[in-house]
Amino acid sequence: MSPEEWKERLEKIAPELLQELSVRKEPAKGLPPLEGADGGVVMRFAPNPNGPPTLGSARGIIVNSEYVKKYGGRFLIRFDDTDPVKKRPMPEAYGWYLEDCAWLGAVPDQVITASERVASYYGIAEELIRRGGAYVCGCAQETFKELKDKGRPCPHRDQPVEMNLDLWKKMLSGELSEGQAVLRVKTDMSHKDPAIRDWAAFRIVTTPHPLAGSKYRVWPLLDFESAVEDHLLGVTHILRGKDLMDSERRQGYLYRHLGWEYPRVVHWGRIKIHQFGSFSTSKLRRAIEAGEYTGWDDPRVPTVRAMRCRGIQAEALRKFMIDLGVGETDISISMDSIYAENRKIVDPIANRYFFVWDPVALEIEGEAPAVAYAPLHPAIDRGERAIPAGNSVFICRSDLEGLKPGDRVRLKDFCNLEILETEPARARFLGKEVGKKMKIIHWAPKNGLPVKVLGPEGVDEGLGEEGIAGELNRVVQFERYGFVRINRLGEPIVAYFAHR
RNA sequence: GCUCCGGUAGUGUAGUCCGGUCAAUCAUUCCGGCCUUUCGAGCCGAAGACCCGGGUUCAAAUCCCGGCCGGAGCACCA
């Protein structure tokens, strides 16, 4: 029976079912629904503050906060800063996160710092030991790994609770030193996935913490700290990277020991950006310290602050990240999509100016007007700018190179010219009327302001109109060049390039 | 080695749970054309994908099995 025949028969037997088939499913818009979120959600973004937020962090900040906006509830920022050595936090970075969250339109309802709350983790650890859910392990790391790989318990696993309690106190008091012992959560040494077997919850670290100093010598590891905080804070839904996929199964044992209920978890894949490759905060940090970049807001760097300095709008980033959704596939995106989003927002608000890169002087013979008038925006009436013109201006070298004596060209919003010679550049005034089908180039006045544009691909230096000096911290478009943000006034004015 | 996850146009994404209007959505990119005193914007058009092989079924992107490819974890990092 063919599908057609099948349909005909169904038509006869049960036409109402055929109806049902033809109800088109609505294309999903925005973020996919979260299960069990209807009563509101508590969600958190939990960075290690070892640098400012990157585009990757922006995804976490935006999507978490967007879900909270969608379902109601609370959005938390939690600093998971419990490693004073290997992922040592930067004291400035805490504030950077808050700043960038605010800019991204995701002001947290609460900010938690793990390194301030270590004492409360101790109480829970002790309770866990009492319940027989954890033990102090004195194995050398390699020894334990060998046993674990074979699925065999270590000799400390069956120590009585009293002994574990005693050893735990020795960890805290300093009688045991760094490397001598860890507290392990009991899971299942024969679990088929070796990653799940008896994981370490606390270790001794004597290096002072940048914030907490030497207040604590026993520090929790991520799986313990994160699991406990999620419970303490009443987190209902966790969005986390696929790299932490084992965490739920590991932490599940802790939750069961303590009789808690685990939040719902959604995973997402790794995100890579063509133009930046894969980047990590620690790699960036080294490159900046080595002087490869000017700082965390260097236009070549994938941080949120660099985007802001380049004139990428928070709204564009939000829209983009929300469109990406929360798939588990690893993705490799292009900045082009972000730029396209941004261009839509910025095109109507950016005023237009002339910026001549690699400038070369052009002398004009004849009665060229002393002032030219150009609209601030081609389609929206925002008035015009008056540009000193006259018989001497600058044009781009690349434009001049495309011209030869006898060519006619129009200086945009100024006048038509006939090229007389190119070295030095000389032309004859032909009139102000807008000629049709004439090549149009832009120009800068004789006393133009020096402007330097820093972009992901390099630096351009040249001359711009005076009006640029009135656009500090705003996005403008340099005609025939691209959108930039004016970041610093002075000699020269410094602008960061966004995109064409 | 052990374990887990994923694979829809160049890049993302919808559809996959509950098989049927899917000759497959939307965006971006690319390519044509129009328009424009910017190489920006706008308008019109075009191109482009269900990883492979079996199975189940009247019907498979969707379910099952096997393979291939990619990613991740197995830390006293986050």
Image (cartoon, rainbow, N blue to C red):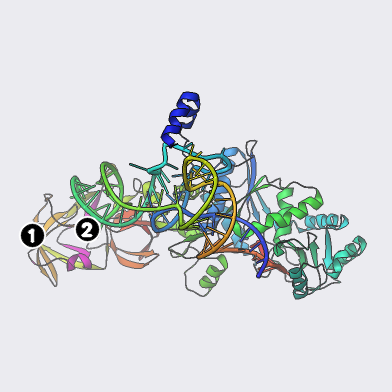
- The residue drawn where x is 19% and y is 52% is A413
Measured as percent of width and height from the top left, residue B60 is found at 47, 46
Q: Residue furthest front?
A: A1
Three-letter amino acid code of the residue under disc 2: His
- The residue drawn where x is 46% and y is 24% is A12
The label on residue A385 is: none
- The residue drawn where x is 84% and y is 63% is A135
- Viewport quadrant of the C terminus of chain A: bottom left
- Name the one closer to the observer, A212 or A42: A42
Start-end of magenta stretch? A385-405
Q: Earlier in the sequence, mark 2 or mark 1?
A: 1
Taking the image as drawn, is residue A86 in sight?
yes
Measured as percent of width and height from the top left, residue A315 is found at 46, 47
Measured as percent of width and height from the top left, residue A325 is found at 51, 48
Three-letter amino acid code of the residue under disc 1: Gly
- Name the one closer to the observer, A467 or A59: A59
The label on residue A366 is: 1
- Viewport quadrant of the N terminus of chain A: top left
Please tell me whether mark 1 sits on a helix, a strand or a loop.
loop
Measured as percent of width and height from the top left, residue A29 is found at 48, 40
Please tell me whether mark 2 sits on a helix, a strand or a loop.
loop
Q: What residue is shown with label 2?
A: A442
Relative to A370, is A28 above or below?
A: above
